[in-house]
Image: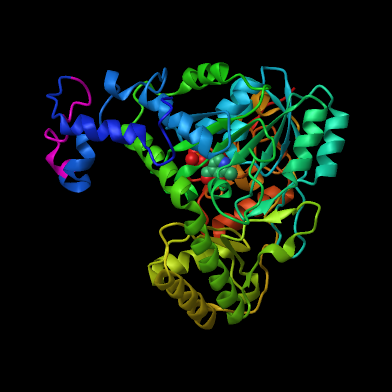
Amino acid sequence: MGEKLSQSDAPLHEALVEYRERRFVPFDVPGHKQGRGTPELTAFLGKSCLSVDVNSMKPLDNLSHPTSVIRDAEALAAGAFGADSAFMMVGGTTSAVQAMIMSSCKGGDSIIIPRNVHRSAINALILCGVTPVYVDPGTHQSLGISLGMAASDVEEAVRANPGAKVVFVNNPTYYGVCPDIRRIVEIAHASDMAVLVDEAHGAHFYFGEDMPSSAMSAGADMSSISMHKTGGSLTQSSFLVTKGTRVDPAYVRTVINLTQTTSASYLLMSSLDIARKELALNGVETFRKVLGLAEYARAEINGIGGYYAFSREIINGRDVCDFDATKLSVHTLGIGLAGVEVYDILRDDYGIQIEFGDMGNLLAIISVGDNHYAIERLVSSMSEIKRLHGKERFGLWDHEYVPPVVKLSPREAFYAPQRPVPLASSEGEISSEFVMCYPPGIPILAPGELITADALGYILYAKKKGSLVMGPQDMKLEYINVAITG
Ligand SMILES: Cc1ncc(COP(=O)(O)O)c(C=O)c1O
């Protein structure tokens, strides 16, 4: 990187602006030729957008082998995140999580991992044949949500599995729960295990004040950060960051290139460059505002009664060691409705799209783009929903976490001979497929797990309540593929 670059620069963005100003005549891909060949698309997205939807070329560098403006943009990102190196990812945080695991483990290795991970992590285990050692993340008794993996449980798993290569951590969970990441790093490093962190929901930890510890500040080796979730970049754009000597960034790049497109989108990459600059310059102020809005919304929602918008008071020093108070996580069972029911009513009757609703909770993301008007609308709608739809709490499912009973590794089950069985009568079989509600994308069943009465009950209940349940090849979810064993 040139000495003169600072966080107020956005080298990739600036190179794209210069490219556009030079008005090149394109005889390369993409074939829409700056939007001229697809007038309807250009009218929809704007000429300005289409004119920089370009492929890599010398002045714009190449994501697979960055030597100029992408290299500089990645170096600035590393600086902003307190990392040694940063990689722009255009396949979402899914691709970052998979690259972290695949660059730290080989087939036959094992990984210590909480079971409430996003499916992308378990997908990586299928891809590279790594065996999970699950740590129960803990469950909140009254909220029913899975928590953040107690350091003492990690310590026990490390002691029992000294050959494991990696400890994998969520920081935070979707609901905002953070584990004792510093202690977990100490424990893992003392046994020479790398710490990989899924910070899909924690981009703001690096830029705001009074935020929970970020992976890089806690000394973790790698982290996958969804800039597109709370950092302001375009959907599907993320960063993978690394720090320390356990990780060889050149090898990480090689692993990323195993599966990454050779036609990375400059729209996505420039959005990462611009969002990083914006947060590095104005993140403190931005997230002070975000936190203020979230605190206000929480107080108002708790004032309605019935709902419980939870926050730092659930910190217990064990499996909840910090809480991301920018997250507006609300327990809904007190008004007699499942989270997904409130989620659906908010969208259908009030024109409000929140992040997700599960069986007992909902999550509204408050971020850089929000204002008081939007918050007031959310609060007044939730108040009216309680008045119009609230009922006695009766017969509602009360826990989100279904402890797995693992019979085969995810890879063994994925590649095992299989047969479809009716979902309703699948209890006792071993699933060879994922089943999850999306979002949050945390598997209820992962390949290799026993279909228990609890798992089946959750899936059938979630379907009945209108959750988007997915994973199996049967799109109607009437059948599930199970492993044929023996
Ligand atoms: C915890 C977690 N990790 C990883 C991902 C994958 O991120 P992406 O959708 O950017 O691929 C998600 C997506 O929701 C997530 O919630």
Q: Residue at x 74, y 40 (%)?
A: 428
**Is residue 88 at least partly visible in the picture?**
no
In which quadrant will I find the C terminus?
top right
x and y percentages locating residue 254 in the rendered image: 52, 16
Q: Residue furthest front?
A: 4
x and y percentages locating residue 247 in the rendered image: 64, 22
Is residue 230 positioned above or below 51 on the image? below
x and y percentages locating residue 395 in the rendered image: 68, 69
Image side of residue 325 versus residue 86, left or right: right
Q: Residue at x 20, y 47 (%)?
A: 44
User: What's the magenta bit mostly, secondary-structure-wise?
Assistant: loop
Is residue 342 positioned above or below 95 on the image? below
Q: Residue at x 80, y 55 (%)?
A: 317
Q: How many marks?
A: 0
Q: Residue furthest bottom?
A: 387
Is residue 237 positioned above or below 189 on the image? below
In which quadrant will I find the N terminus?
top left
Out of 375 and 360, give the one closest to the viewer.
Answer: 375
Image side of residue 313 versus residue 47, left or right: right
x and y percentages locating residue 80 in the rendered image: 51, 39
Out of 378 and 60, give the one closest to the viewer.
Answer: 60
Looking at the picture, the colour scheme in use is rainbow
Out of 390 and 27, give the one closest to the viewer.
Answer: 27
**Is residue 334 at least partly visible in the picture?**
yes
Q: Residue at x 54, y 49 (%)?
A: 207
Image side of residue 396 versus residue 231, left or right: right
What segment carries the magenta color? Answer: 28-42
Is 18 in the magenta? no
Image side of residue 198 versus residue 69, left or right: right
